[in-house]
Image: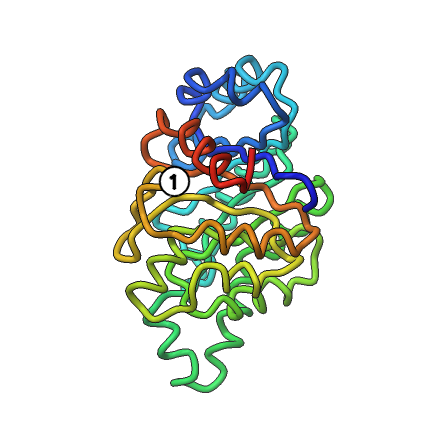
Amino acid sequence: MTDLPIVGAAMTLKDVEINRNWLLEKPRDLELQDFVPAEVLAGDWQSVATEARRLLDGHQGRLGIHGPFMGLNVASSDPDIRAVVAKRMDQALDVAEALEVTQIVIHSPYSTWMHNNLDNWPEQRQQVINLTHETLGAAVKRAENQGCVFVLENIEDKDPADRRKLVESFNSTAFALSIDTGHAAYAYGSTGAPPVDYFVQDAGEMLAHVHLQDADGYADRHWPLGYGNVNFRAIFANLAKITSNPRLIIEIRDKSQIQASAAHLAALGLAQ
């Protein structure tokens, strides 16, 4: 990245109404989060998509959605659960097709417990990969044909290399890496993971998406940027070394502070 990157944000449609002028002033990337609940994906998501098209008239950035994750595990050992997860991913792709969405955020299967037990049973590492392929294989193939990319976000991940190797195993242009700065900060502060900038360094050119939030290393705070102790200077220094042009998405709890968070990065000379 030579020029300062342009940050976008994660919002629901009601938050888009509040931040619409800011969103449209530059080609800011947007991640819609209205399509996470199963009730929406299995219900009348079309009316939500219609409202999205109205509100986003004039939007010039890249459009993504946060995919389903609540109660789901992409590496479940239960075939019935895998079938439900696969169904939800297919529904998310229906939304993506209707809105010309090019990126869907989904969650990593790796937990803190799993990190300490991956080598406690023979073939456990490979089993996580195999089960994820069984769950997501068809969805990733459909995404390839649709021009969409799934990005796998760290949640409890302690070793970023595990998630990277899982994504690499698909060998697909439709599967890439996502980093959540607050999740990585939690893992660093509470479970002994490497610092957040190391997650960026490990992802390298496979990085396609970043959730920018501030935190304290204890919990998943989703604070406005500048409220916690996440080292954004170190993160952006590593981002400057890669050419994959990841979407930089402010994802905070208080959506009224999105613009202030972007201003915080601008004041640090990191983004616009």
Q: How many marks?
A: 1
x then y, percent, for residue 151: 56, 50
Q: Quadrant of residue 118?
A: bottom left
x and y percent of residue 56 in the render? 57, 18
Q: Secondary structure at mark 1?
A: loop
Does residue 212 appear left or right of residue 205 in this picture? Answer: left
Q: Residues within 10 Å of mark 1 (few under 14, many from 20)?
A: many
Does residue 41 show up?
no
Image point 34% across, 52% down: which residue?
A: 229
Q: Position of residue 79 (x, y in %)?
A: 45, 61
Residue 215 visible, this orientation? yes
Residue under label 1: 225
Q: Is residue 220 above or below residue 110?
A: above
* Above or below 250: residue 129: below
Quarter assignment of residue 40 = top left
At 54% across and 69% down in the image, what residue appears?
129
- Amino acid at dot 1: Leu
